Image: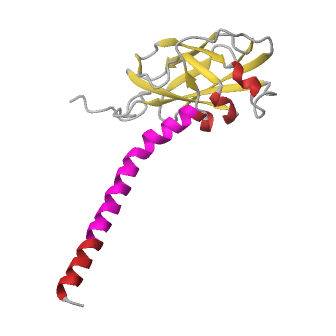
Amino acid sequence: MTRMTVKARNRRVVIASLALVAAMAGLAFASVPLYRLFCAVTGYGGTTQRATAAPAEILGRPIAIRFNADVARDLPWSFVPVQREVVLPVGLTAIAYYRVHNDGARPIVGTATFNVTPDVAGAYFTKIECFCFTEQRLDPGESADLPVRFFVDPALLDDVETMDLASITLSYTFFRAPGQSASSDSGREKPDDPN
C-alpha cells in the first residue's frame, strides 16, 4: 500500500469517527425534548395531556379521580389536596384545589411536577389549567390554594387497556426551585450570607 492510500484511509476513518461523535452528541441534546414529546403524545409514564377546552361529549360513566400531594425533603412546605377524591362523568370538566403553606422562616420559591397512575391513563387525563412547572413564591407563614382544571377524555372508554378503569390518581410533588439554598428555611440551620 502506498503512503497516500494509507493517509487517505486514515483521513476517512477520522472523518467518519468525528461524524459519529457529532451525531451522538446531537442525539444526546435532542433526547430530552424528544422524550418529552413522546410522553406527551402517548401518555407514557403517566404524562397527562393539555387542552384549551373541554370535550363536547360527556359520557355518563363515572370515574373517581384521587388526589395526592408530596413535598421534597429539603422544602419546608405543607402541601395537601383540599379534597381527596371526586367522582365525575367521563368528559366532564372539574376543578380541584391543592393547598400549600410555607412553614419556613423565609420566602421560598417552589415548583411542582405531576403524574397520573395508572400510567396508561396519562393519555386520557387532560389538564386545561395547572400550577405544575410554574414557580410559586410563598412568604413565611403564607398559604395558597392552587387550582387544577381537568377532564378525562371520553376516548378512555374506547381503549381496551383503560375502558374498565374505575379510578385515576393525580399526584403532584413540590420541589425547591433551582438556585435556592436550603439553609435557614426553618430557622434551625445556619443562615445564608445576606450578600
Q: Position of residue 75 (x, y in %)?
A: 47, 30
Quadrant in which the C terminus is drawn = top left
Q: Could you say which is closer to the camera, residue 141 or residue 95? A: 95
Q: Could you say which is closer to the camera, residue 171 or residue 137? A: 171
Q: Position of residue 23 (x, y in %)?
A: 35, 56
Instruction: Name the residue: 17% across, 83% down.
Output: 4
Instruction: Name the residue: 54% across, 32% down.
Output: 40
Q: Position of residue 177 (x, y in %)?
A: 40, 30
Q: Position of residue 67 (x, y in %)?
A: 66, 22
Instruction: Name the residue: 45% across, 23% down.
Output: 104
- Way the structure is coloured: secondary structure
Is 17 a magenta residue?
yes
Please identify the residue farthest to the left as the structure is shown: 4
**Relative horizontal placement of residue 66, taking residue 32 as reference (left or right):** right
Quadrant in which the N terminus is drawn = bottom left
Q: Where, by quadrant of the figure, is residue 188 drawn? A: top left
Q: Where, by quadrant of the figure, is residue 69 drawn? A: top right
Q: Where, by quadrant of the figure, is residue 93 drawn? A: top right
Please identify the residue farthest to the bottom as the structure is shown: 1
Prevalent SS, magenta region:
helix
**Relative horizontal placement of residue 44, taking residue 168 as reference (left or right):** left
Q: Could you say which is closer to the camera, residue 19 or residue 45? A: 19
Q: Could you say which is closer to the camera, residue 49 or residue 57? A: 57
The span picked out in magenta is 14-41
Is 117 a magenta residue?
no
**Tag count:** 0
